Amino acid sequence: MDFRKLNLITGWGVFLVATIVYVLTIEPTTSFWDTGEFITTAYKLEIGHPPGAPLFMLLARLFSMFDSTETVPVAVNELSAVSSRLTILFLFWTITHFGRKMALKGDDANNNGKIIATMAAGVVGALAYTFSDSFWFSAVEGEVYAMSSLFTAAVFWAILRWESLSNGKNEMRWIIAIAYLMGLSIGVHLLNLLAIPAICFVVFFKRNKPSTRGLVITSLVSLVILGIIQSGIIPGVVSLAGKFELFFTNSLGMPFNTGVIIYALIGIGALTYGLYYTHKKNKPIWNTAILSVVVIILGYSTFATIVIRSSANPPLDENNPENVFTLLAYLNREQYGDRPLLYGHFFNSPTDMQNPRGDGKPVYAPVES
């Protein structure tokens, strides 16, 4: 029995079941929460609540372009349905991948009974998730969680595909593809970043023998990578652009956006030189690392949509993120405040009489001289 062929056929069969279920149960309109806002922002490319979901907005706009105004909610809901049934497909292939590694070894590789059992495990696991309450609920409404689940499932399936390569050929292509998917996922939801520790452990177990020291180091490395992306790249790219803009505008008196343009040119030049240097000096690890950062930033660049559309001043324009300063506040969710877990203000902190309505941070806005 051909495992690969049966795996493909059964996987697409599960996909068909999920498709029928979600199409038959899709919501004809909006739910009474954020979905109404997401549908509105998608239909007219407007600015919703922080931190935004520009990639979801663009794809939902594409889905809604082929429907009349009355059926736009269904079109956006269908985007979630498509994302969810693809998630089920990748989940099935993930389960059968692990089943094959556990049950089909050596002489059992062509054992028909174990192959069928592996397929059955994938079907049961994938369909159980298909009909689970929270996933089914998000699959039929215009929210970001369905697409976020798709990115998470696709990324983890991709690292398993990387792990299954035995000759080392084309390995780095999968790593770059994963980095790009993660960059794109930032424009939907940050859930996908939680797959990073799992990815690091898959790499560790393929490259090394299990050991306590190795597990600890891998855990720390995964947390560092997660921190670099979530606390470094996501706010850092925009924060550094703001510092350049502030210096060139306020200190040098140059026109607005000069600092942002110079910052972009310096960043592109530095990354390009880094790729050239590591390739010339035959440093594949560093070359892959820099290229991964590049594709993450490319995926993250969907947030340019937020600035572009906010500059057009649409009717729904929350936080008005039309420059790097307001965009940073938008990405950092500053309008919600914070709730420190270890230290900071508490529920009945006395009011700061010198600054009763703010946190002391300057708020920059363009002022024509």
Image: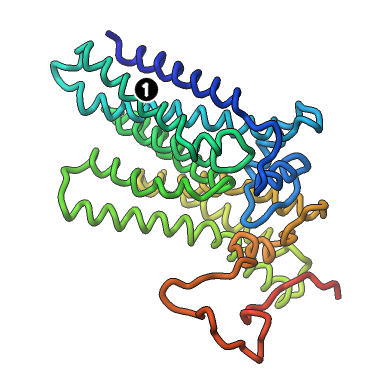
Instruction: Identify the image's colour scheme: rainbow, by chain, secondary structure or one colour.
Output: rainbow
Q: Is residue 37 above or below residue 100?
A: below
The amino acid marked with disc number 1 is Val
Q: Nearer the viewer, residue 121 or 95?
A: 121
Q: Is residue 350 above or below residue 338?
A: below
**Residue at horizontal 74%, vertical 59%?**
322
Image label count: 1
**Residue at horizontal 75%, vertical 60%?**
320
Q: How packed is label 1: few (under 14 Cα within 10 Å), some, or many (20 or more)? A: many
Side of 334 relative to 106 (left or right): right
Q: Position of residue 32 (x, y in %)?
A: 67, 46
Q: Position of residue 74 (x, y in %)?
A: 69, 31
* Quadrant the N terminus occupies: top left
Reading the image, the residue beneath label 1 is: 123
* Quadrant the C terminus occupies: bottom right
Q: Is residue 116 above or below residue 176?
A: above
**Residue at horizontal 39%, vertical 48%?**
196
Q: Position of residue 342 (x, y in %)?
A: 41, 75
Q: Position of residue 45 (x, y in %)?
A: 75, 44
Side of 17 relative to 264 (left or right): left
**Residue at horizontal 70%, vertical 77%?**
251
The residue furthest top is: 1
Classify mark 1: helix, strand or loop.
Answer: helix
Q: Nearer the viewer, residue 89 or 159?
A: 89
Side of 331 relative to 16 (left or right): right
Q: Is residue 212 above or below residue 103?
A: below
Q: Is residue 95 visible?
A: yes
The residue furthest right is: 369
Side of 190 relative to 99 (left or right): right
The residue furthest bottom is: 353
Q: Nearer the viewer, residue 259 or 334?
A: 334
Q: Is residue 275 visible?
A: no
